[in-house]
Amino acid sequence: MPHDSRSAQEETGGPGPHDHHLQKLLSRMTLEEKVGQLFVLHVYGHHATEPDAADIELNERELGVRTAADAVAKYRPGGLIYFGWAHNTRDPQQLAALSNDVQRAAADGAPGIPLLLSVDQEHGVVARIGAPATLLPGAMALGAGGSADDVREAARIAGTELRALGIYQNYAPSADVNVNPANPVIGVRSFGAGPEAVSACVTAQIEGYRDAGVAPAVKHFPGHGDTATDSHSALPYIHHTRAQWEELDAPPFRAALATGVDVVMTAHIVVPALDPALDPATLSYPVVTGILREELGHDGVVVTDSLSMRGVRTKYGDDRVAVLALKAGVDQLLHPPQPELARDAILRAVREGELTEARIDESVLRILRLKEKLGLFEQAYTTAAAVTATVGSEAHRVAADRIAERTTTLLRNEGDLLPLSPGTHGRLLVLGADPVSPSGTTGPPTSVLAAALTELGFTATASGTGTEPSPGTVEKALAEAASGHDAVLVTTYDVTPGDPQHSLVTALTAIPGGPPVVIVSVRTPNDVTLLPGVAAALAAYSWTDVELRAAARVIAGRVRPTGRLPVPVPSPDDPGTVLHPVGHGLSYPPDGV
């Protein structure tokens, strides 16, 4: 019997003790309704029925409808995913109202099944929902903190606020082991470079989300940590042997599955050792069914990474991608760029015998089970009162600040320059990179850092110079630095040899008799190796407000730095030579605070 024609009972081991009502619901659904459940769509607009004119135009162009409610009526999707760039996330009360309204649209038509609303809210450098929601340290920062309790609490806070917004699925945590320091797509989204440490963090995050009543999606299977290619723009290859995969990539996923995680997200990567056909893992039967389901025993939901990414679209058209993902063993099709084309391709594949309706039933049953487990059939709505009481609460914000303090990592401190005190270094100049907030609601980083230091008793002036300061900007910054400032702080963002940031910091450190220079790296911690002239260097791992405020408290000596590198920092000239190993991190002497 072909692998895609097994019955749902054969695939799932027969109906579970509580599955009969779900099987009955499934039996009443048309094929079109079943196929709709496989899709997690994006829609444009902050309102389900009255979006802005520009969002109506975008919905019509990409979805063939005017509004989110129209999209739910047309496609009957299993879920929606929210994005800031789709203008879904203006503020918490608006987002909760949107969630309620799209759930009503789902309930109003056949088959009347609640939506599984989702978001990609990893925190750190990937956050779709911003302030006043609580923003938390991202994965690598949490890895630097080294506390399973903090990792678990961060997920519990994040999940509790998502559920108050009507969101029951989060595409986090990343189980990718950051083997390649030059990885452009994972980087600080990974908890670290050690499989054991990453496994512990992944397990703790799953427990935290589960405590909050939200389904995490552990990603990106079979492991995206050793690639120098961004799967958003191309198809990466990972050349680990099967033995290397078992040693480096598999442990966090095994740990996640041991906790009973409900959802696994696939990666748009090629691992020849796992599938010699060189198909992206998302479309690979040997990877999804052979390894994830049969070898590792995952019988929960499998969701694709976004199907709009180039990595999954380089070999096949958007119509074939949807069909091949289902044939591989995937259940949820996330964010397809042409949903009508993908839906029609699946229906055609069933009519022509390439897929069977029984295969569709397998996936729909898994999705229904997840919705039932999350309580969506009983209560899919939220309330304004829940948002007010939960989202961005004082308790959550205080906890986020304390967690962030324990992640900040001091990498260099020549002459025990830090901590600074207002009495000896009262006038501070804050320069550097001002990357846009991942949620679009906070920052700019130099201003946040300067404001935090001013609150701590310093006179701090911000003058953002950007990631590519012009010669004129550098000249102005040098003049400012030499005009009576006691120290200069620079936020750095992925410095490369000879780039404008490198030139700026190098020039600052060369001012005759000039003030000492401190860098705060706001992405990878590698910047310290390229800037030998700086007196002190800290790693914040992101540029969100919570991490910058924590860095300010560390600089001012209000808290001692306790973060430790979760990844090695290699020499820029010889990647095989490690300058700062995993576990490196300085602190202040007991009398230095």
Image: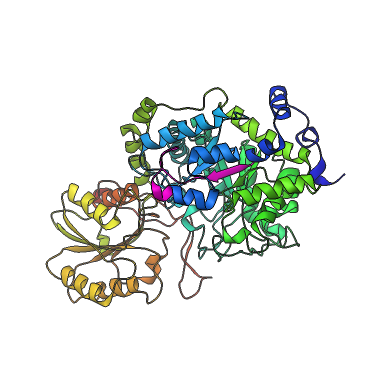
Where residue 519 appears, as percent x and y from the top left, is: 31, 63
- Residue 450 sits above or below residue 433 on the image: above
- Residue 327 sits above or below residue 238 on the image: above
412 horizontally vs 243: left or right: left
User: Is residue 84 among the parts visible in the rendering?
Assistant: no
User: Is residue 276 among the parts visible in the rendering?
Assistant: yes
Magenta span: chief secondary structure: loop
542 horizontally vs 301: left or right: left
Q: State which region is magenta.
A: 38-55
Where residue 545 appears, as percent x and y from the top left, is: 32, 49
**Towards the viewer: 207 or 107:** 107
Q: Residue at x 32, y 63 (%)?
A: 433
Where residue 305 appears, as percent x and y from the top left, is: 59, 51
Where residue 581 appears, as percent x and y from the top left, is: 47, 61
Q: Residue at x 67, y 42 (%)?
A: 331
Magenta segment: does it hold 53? yes
> For the image shown, how many numbered marks are present on the structure?
0
Q: Residue at x 71, y 47 (%)?
A: 346
Q: Quadrant of the N terminus?
A: top right
**Towards the viewer: 362 or 47:** 47
Scheme by which the image is coloured: rainbow
249 horizontally vs 435: left or right: right
Considering every residue shown, the one lying at the far right of the view is 1
**Towards the viewer: 12 or 349:** 349
